[in-house]
């Protein structure tokens, strides 16, 4: 028989003896002749060996190991106060000195281990929740109703009222030793910890109201310890995971601070600050494990707004932390610190106590809450590369370098992508690189697709008709993005610089000069996703919303290595104005936020504008490349006309040299070619010079450019001479 099975048998024997004593007391109160009764608390302690752990396989209801709250719980401290408190600082501390009854059966404190004596679950509960002997016996009387079918009839007989087959405080005062009126107080443990349910209809006196034991408490006394089923629908258990050195250092600093909290003082709320909730959850569970606890996630959106409902939740959780080694992780990443101060979240944290973590995007400046803050970031680029190499095995150094250089994933996502790619290419000698790359891109698309418009990059370097100077600048941009890992990590630039690591470029020129195509060419060459920023999805009339949207956009793009293309950038990156009212002030705040975020952005950001002079000069200082897209000359226009029609198109004889004399941008030439193709398709003929010139006249009129009919007639006469 296992240690837990031995303890369970001893605990059952304890309950049987205690209930037999209660039955005898009730029979005496009913006037029946019984043997002399002994108090339930005088039931002899049954010696047995103290087991170090609970075998959870013994029963499906037993779901926790015997654990205590680490070093912080090892200090000696007095038992819970005799009067239940009305303030957080006076309430029983979940980190108190008494051993945690998480295993119900086993007290792992040094003194108890030396004594090697059995401690029943009911006694442990009384110790942890501060019950007096009388209160413990009242609770046992109510528990007996669930465990012994003879109890209802005995209760009715003892109260000399067949309509009351249940325990009451009046009955407890009559049959139990050392009765105390303060046991009825809402501040005493029986009512404060919600151990009893009081059924008091209408004007019925409290002392005569029916009492019943809380189901969670009944099961605890029987030796079944699990999280209250009223809490579980709100909670998700966190899982432990290995941490990289940079995150383990955060855990070590946090543990050092928590373990130096004076005994008797409440633990501070731990603020985990940053954008990566997955890493924060792993860190929280690692800290909880060091204290012998299991952490549970609770979404802040599920917190009740009503004071009464929230107080019930607080007390149930605090009771749970007395009965089990648990920690709470509140996910409030979507709540602003300013909003939290005025929301139910603030009151919840001021009341809940215990080991509590809060997931926030930015620090909460709330002096009312004692907090310990820690910045949590994703693993460093070198740590990510190391993990990629370890998962992919030998010969994958190039894949690891590229993936870590372009993407910013946490450990869990790296593991998922690597295992999926390895499984997909298990039977193939090659293709691992493509599988990894596509897997990484697909993991980041959902978040970005909600915030920006994805552009499928199709253009190549050959499609770009620019002077060599501008083309060389574009190639430099692509090369820097490709070689980021080598320069920043292998050569140590990241260690020496905490800003200015972003790669940003400004594409300036008239509409139609090739700015969007150039962005496509770079994205295509690098194999990265290209997203055009939709201003309607980003800019909001509500104060602060634009910054939130931009933050989400930059964070998602940074993780997925996406290229952000800000078309018509002057709308977002315009000059700051003189502050005349609150609207000007908040508009300037948006620009300031963009300045800071653009500088810290890990990926490539491309700003396109045909109004370079409208941009704030502070942006120009932070932009690494400025590429001017000139109006195409005759040579560039000739190259554009030569390649504008697909090979499958039905094209007649064209005079490319003479068409190049039309002063048009590449975008206009593309539009003319497409319109001419539709005209030809409608006529069932080839694309000829007259059709192109007809489309060109329409383009000139659209652009409000003068149409010189003499030039067009000359071109028409020469149209057949290619």
Image (cartoon, rainbow, N blue to C red):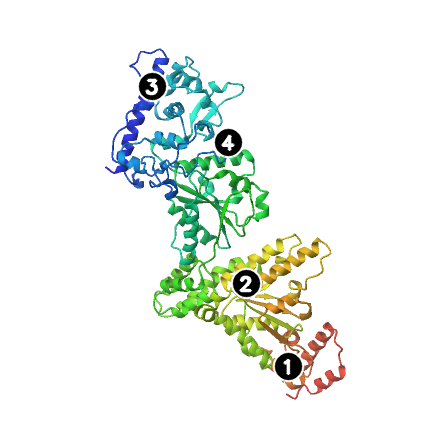
Is 99 above or below relative to 440? above
Mark 3: secondary structure: helix
Could you give the CA–CA distance between mark 2 and mark 4, rounded to whole angstroms?
Answer: 48 Å
Q: Quadrant of residue 576?
A: bottom right
Look at mark 3 in the image and give the residue it sits on. 23
CA separation in Å, label 4 and label 1 = 82 Å
Q: Which quadrant is the C terminus positioned in?
A: bottom right
Which label belongs to residue 401? none
| Relative to 552, residue 154 above or below | above
Instruction: Kindly report which numbered mark, 2 or 3, lies closer to the viewer in this rendering.
Output: 2
The crowd level at tag 4 (other Cα within 10 Å; few <14, some 14-19, many 20+) is few
Rendered residue at 44%/48% (across/down): 257
Q: Are marks 4 and 3 in contact (CB under 8 Å)?
A: no
| Crowdedness near tag 2: few (<14), some (14–19) or many (≥20) residues, C-alpha within 10 Å | some
Q: Are marks 3 and 1 in contact (CB under 8 Å)?
A: no
Which residue position is annotated with label 2?
A: 600
| Numbered circle sitting on residue 86 | 4
Residue 644 on image: x %, y %: 60, 78
Q: How far is mark 2 from mark 1, CA to CA?
A: 39 Å
Mark 3 or mark 1, earlier in chain: 3
Dot 2: what SS? Answer: helix
Disc on the earlier residue, 4 or 1:
4
Would residue 81 appear left or right of 45 to someone viewing this image?
right
Q: Do labels 2 and 1 touch, CB within 8 Å?
A: no
Task: Please say if 130 is above or below 551.
Answer: above
Q: Residue at x 31, y 21 (%)?
A: 20
Residue at figure coordinates x 62%, y 56% from the top left = 546
Give how far across and how far down residue 349 sits, in percent: 51, 41
* Sequence-earlier tag: 4 or 3: 3
Which x, y percent locates residue 321? 42, 38
Which numbered disc, 3 or 1, marks the residue closer to the eye?
Answer: 3
Q: Earlier in the sequence, mark 2 or mark 4?
A: 4
């Amino acid at each position: 028989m296992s240690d837990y099975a031995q303890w369970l048998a001893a605990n059952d024997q304890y309950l049987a003896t205690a209930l037999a004593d209660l039955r005898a007391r009730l029979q005496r109160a009913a006037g029946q002749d019984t043997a002399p009764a002994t108090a339930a608390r005088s039931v002899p302690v049954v010696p047995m060996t103290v087991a170090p752990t609970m075998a959870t396989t013994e029963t499906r209801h037993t779901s926790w190991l015997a654990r205590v709250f680490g070093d912080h719980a090892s200090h000696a401290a007095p038992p819970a106060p005799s009067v239940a408190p009305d303030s957080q600082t006076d309430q029983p501390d979940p980190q108190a000195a008494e051993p945690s009854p998480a295993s119900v059966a086993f007290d792992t404190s040094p003194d108890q281990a030396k004594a090697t004596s059995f401690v029943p679950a009911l006694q442990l509960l009384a110790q942890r929740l501060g019950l007096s002997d009388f209160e413990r016996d009242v609770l046992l009387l109510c528990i007996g109703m669930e465990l012994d079918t003879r109890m209802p009839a005995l209760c009715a007989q003892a109260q000399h009222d067949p309509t009351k087959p249940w325990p009451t405080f009046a009955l407890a005062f009559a049959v139990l030793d050392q009765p105390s009126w303060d046991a009825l107080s809402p501040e005493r443990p029986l009512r404060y910890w919600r151990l009893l349910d009081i059924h008091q209809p209408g004007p019925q006196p409290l002392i005569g109201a029916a009492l019943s034991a809380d189901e969670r408490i009944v099961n605890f006394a029987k030796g079944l310890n699990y999280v209250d089923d009223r809490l579980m629908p709100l909670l998700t258990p966190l899982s432990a995971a290995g941490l990289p050195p940079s995150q383990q250092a955060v855990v070590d600093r946090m543990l050092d601070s928590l373990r130096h909290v004076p005994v008797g003082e409440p633990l501070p709320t731990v603020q985990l600050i940053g954008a990566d909730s997955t890493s924060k959850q792993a860190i929280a569970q690692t800290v909880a494990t060091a204290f012998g606890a299991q952490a549970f996630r609770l979404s802040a959106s599920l917190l009740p707004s009503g004071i009464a409902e929230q107080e019930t939740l607080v007390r149930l959780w605090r009771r749970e932390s007395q009965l089990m080694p648990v920690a709470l992780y509140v996910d409030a990443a979507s709540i602003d610190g300013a909003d939290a101060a005025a929301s139910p979240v603030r009151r919840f944290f001021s009341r809940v106590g215990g080991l509590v973590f809060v997931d926030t995007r930015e620090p909460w400046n709330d002096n009312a809450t004692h907090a310990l803050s820690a910045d949590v970031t994703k693993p460093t680029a070198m740590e990510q590369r190391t993990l990629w190499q370890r998962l992919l095995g030998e010969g994958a150094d190039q894949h690891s370098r590229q993936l870590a250089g372009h993407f910013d994933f946490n450990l869990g996502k790296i593991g998922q992508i690597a295992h999926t790619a390895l499984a997909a290419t298990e039977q193939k000698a090659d293709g691992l690189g493509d599988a990894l790359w596509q897997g990484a891109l697909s993991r980041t698309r959902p978040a970005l697709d909600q915030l920006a418009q994805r552009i499928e990059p199709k253009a190549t370097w050959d499609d770009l008709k620019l002077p060599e100077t501008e083309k060389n600048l574009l190639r430099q941009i692509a090369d820097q993005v490709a070689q980021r890992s080598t320069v920043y990590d292998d050569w140590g630039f990241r260690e020496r610089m905490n800003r200015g690591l972003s790669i940003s470029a400004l594409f300036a020129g008239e509409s139609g000069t090739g700015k969007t195509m150039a962005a496509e060419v770079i994205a295509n060459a690098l194999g990265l996703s290209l997203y055009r920023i939709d201003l309607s999805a980003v800019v909001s009339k509500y104060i602060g919303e634009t910054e939130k949207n931009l933050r989400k956009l930059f964070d998602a793009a940074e993780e997925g290595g996406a290229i952000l293309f800000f078309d018509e950038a002057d709308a977002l990156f315009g000059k700051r104005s003189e502050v005349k009212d609150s609207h000007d002030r908040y508009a300037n705040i948006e620009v300031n936020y963009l300045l800071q975020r653009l500088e810290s952005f890990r990926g490539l950001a491309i700003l396109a504008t045909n109004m370079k002079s409208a941009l704030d000069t502070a942006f120009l200082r932070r932009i690494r490349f400025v590429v001017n897209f000139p109006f195409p000359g005759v040579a560039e226009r000739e190259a554009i006309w030569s390649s504008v029609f697909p090979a499958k198109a039905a094209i007649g004889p064209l005079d490319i040299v003479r068409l190049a004399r039309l002063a048009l941008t590449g975008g206009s030439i593309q539009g003319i070619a497409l319109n001419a193709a539709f005209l030809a398709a409608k006529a069932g003929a080839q694309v000829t010079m007259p059709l192109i010139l007809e489309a060109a006249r329409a383009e000139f009129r659209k652009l409000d450019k003068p149409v010189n009919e003499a030039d067009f007639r000359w071109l028409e006469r020469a149209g057949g001479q290619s």
